[in-house]
Every structure is written in C-alpha cells, then in structure tokens.
Image (cartoon, rainbow, N blue to C red):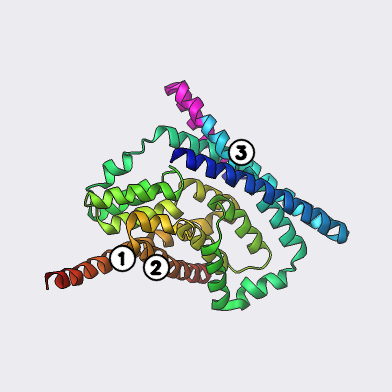
Amino acid sequence: MNVTAIIINGIAVVGLLIAFVKDGKKAIKSLKMAGRSFIKILPMVFIIIIIIGLLLGFVPPDQISRFVGEQSGFGGILLVGAAGALMHIPALLSFPLAASLLEDGASVSAVAAFITTLTMIGTITLPLEIKELGKKIALLRNGLSFIIAIIIALIMGAIL
Amino acid sequence: MKKDLKEKQKRGMIRDWVLLGSILITTVVLLSIFPDKKGAVISTSWDFFIEMALILPAVMVILGLFAVWVPKDIVVKYLGNASGIRGIFLAIILGALPTGPLYIAFPMAAALLKKGAKISNIIVFLSAWACIKIPQEMVELQFLGVQFMISRLILTIIFVVIMGLVIERIIKWGDKEGGVENAI
C-alpha cells in the first residue's frame, strides 16, 4: 500500500469517526450514499480496468507513442485533447487510464491534455449549460477551456 | 422531474453493465485467439484493479460525508457577493468541495448570476467544480504522482482565473455593444 492510499483511507476513517461522534444518523446516511455511488461506478471501473489490460497487452508501446507520444508532437496533443473533450467517462477513472497510457509511451503533454479536457469540457452537458447560463457563457467557457487545456499540457510537457 | 432522473440513471446503469458484459466477452475471445497475451493482459488489469480497490471505497466515503454534511446553499451564501481576490479564492474552494456532478452546478451558477455575482467568479467556480475536485486530485495523486498532480493543479488554477477574467471582459464588452444598438 503506498503513501497516497494510506492518507486517503486515513482521511476517510477519521472523517467517518468524527461523523459518527457528531451525528450517527447522518453518518449512516453518508455511508449509504457512498455505497450507492460505489455500486453505480463499479461497472465503469471494471470496463476501464479491462480496457487498460487490453491496451497494454495488445498495443505495442511504439504504436501508442507514435500517436500520442513525444514524436506525435502538437498534432498528437490536439488529438488526445479532442478525444478527452468528446469522451464521457467519470473523471475519477480518467486517471488510471492516463497512467496506463503514460506507462506505455504516451507523452506527459498528451496525458495532461486528455485529463484536462475530459474534466473541464462537457459536450454531453453542454445543452444544459447553454440552457442555464446562455449560449455565450457556455460556448466561451467550453471553447476557451480547450485552449487553456492545450496550453497547460504544453507547459506540463516542458517542465516534467 | 426527479422520477425522470432516476429512470435515466437506471438506464445508464443497465447500459454500463451491458457494456461491461460485451467487453468481457470480447476479451475472452481475444485472449483465446492470442493465448500468449493472456499473462500480460491479466497481470496489468490486476495491478490496476488493486490500485483502484485501495482507494475507491475511501474516496466514495469522503464524497458521501461531504454530500451529507456540506449544505447545498453554502455556495450561494458565500459566493453571492464576494469580489476581488477573495471572490476568486472562494470560487476555487467552493468549486473544489466534493459536492456532486457538474450538472448540478449549472443551476447554482445561473442563480448566482441573476443575483449579480461576478461573471469571472462564476466561470472560476464552474471550472474548479469540473476539474479541481478534491477526490479527483486524490486519485490523480495515486496514479500519476505528486509532481504531475501539483503542477497540473497550479497551472489549472492560474489559467482558469485568467479565463474567468477574459470571459468577463468579452461578455461585458458584448453587452456594451448590444446596449448601444438597443439605444438606437
């Protein structure tokens, strides 16, 4: 078990203890909620895990790095950024997927672009965003998010 | 409305399980055609499974605790009339609290705008909600390491704030133009 996992579990345990001391009923409600979201995300977790297995098992690293690695350059970053903007997977699960790509030859920039566009840009939620906030704000936010995601990715690639 | 949402979620769940089933079948077929890949695929999937299993339950518990303990109107209460550096800071903190998916932030943001909150703060709030969520940062730390997580976090905060200010300028500028037109 690594340090991060220990810290996260520690926070959860301490949080739960405080919750139970303060208000048992509310604590149980939180636990039930946790259980429900866990079950809800479970099939996606397995799907991502299997995809990662297949990806690393079947696609040779030089193929991955050709499309999203260092030699793919700016085009590769744009490509992965666009994929992230269009994909609709839970943000929590984008990190293991990103880690597996990184392990298999993707560049830091490409992985950073993927995570940033995936979380910041919501093509599926765009109609709702337009309805609530108006076309101007929604389109500006999503459009500029793509640009800053690419800038963030390029800087990440330069410093890491 | 609520029933609709539940119905939609249920359908989403079924779709996820069907997807999982078809991916499992595809994997079994693939591995029986290429048995030499079996070891690599299974050991990779297993490693990632263990890493997920170590943190996902704890992340869900933290999410549950926040959902129950942090009142939904906290955002409206604090972000409504905050401005300047304090406003931006609050927008980031309130957005980062693990309080649910992005689509519940839109009506909150809309209500705040009507109340006269600054556009830049709302954009920063929405962006923080989308990509600086505390549980997300934890999972990022676990899988991509501290250097990656911290640098992306700092860069994201800087650029999201710039984006908020730029969008505010554009909207205000557009309004002014529209205002002149309307006056004529």
As rendered, which of A48 and B17 lies closer to the eye? B17
Question: What residue is shown with label 1?
Answer: B167
Q: Position of residue A92 (x, y in %)?
A: 55, 50
Magenta-colored segment: predominant secondary structure: helix
Residues at circles 3 and 2 in contact by the CB criterion of under 8 Å: no
Check if mark 3 and mark 2 are on a common chain: yes
Residue B108 visible? The answer is yes
Q: Dot 3: few (<14), some (14–19), or many (≥20) neighbours within 10 Å?
A: few
Q: From which residue to which does the magenta span run?
A: A5-30
Q: Position of residue B159 (x, y in %)?
A: 38, 64
B117 inside magenta stretch: no
Q: Position of residue B29 (x, y in %)?
A: 83, 56
Task: Report which quarter residue A32 is drawn in.
Answer: top right
Question: What residue is shown with label 3?
Answer: A39
Question: What residue is shown with label 2?
Answer: A144
Taking the spot 45% from the left edge, 70% from the top edge, the residue there is: A151
- Secondary element at tag 2: helix
**Amino acid at pointer 2:** Leu
Going by the image, does B150 lie left or right of A4? left
As rendered, which of A78 and A17 lies closer to the eye? A78
Check if mark 2 and mark 1 are on a common chain: no
Q: Dot 1: few (<14), some (14–19), or many (≥20) neighbours within 10 Å?
A: many
Residues at circles 2 and 1 in contact by the CB criterion of under 8 Å: yes
| Label 2 – label 1 distance at C-alpha | 9 Å
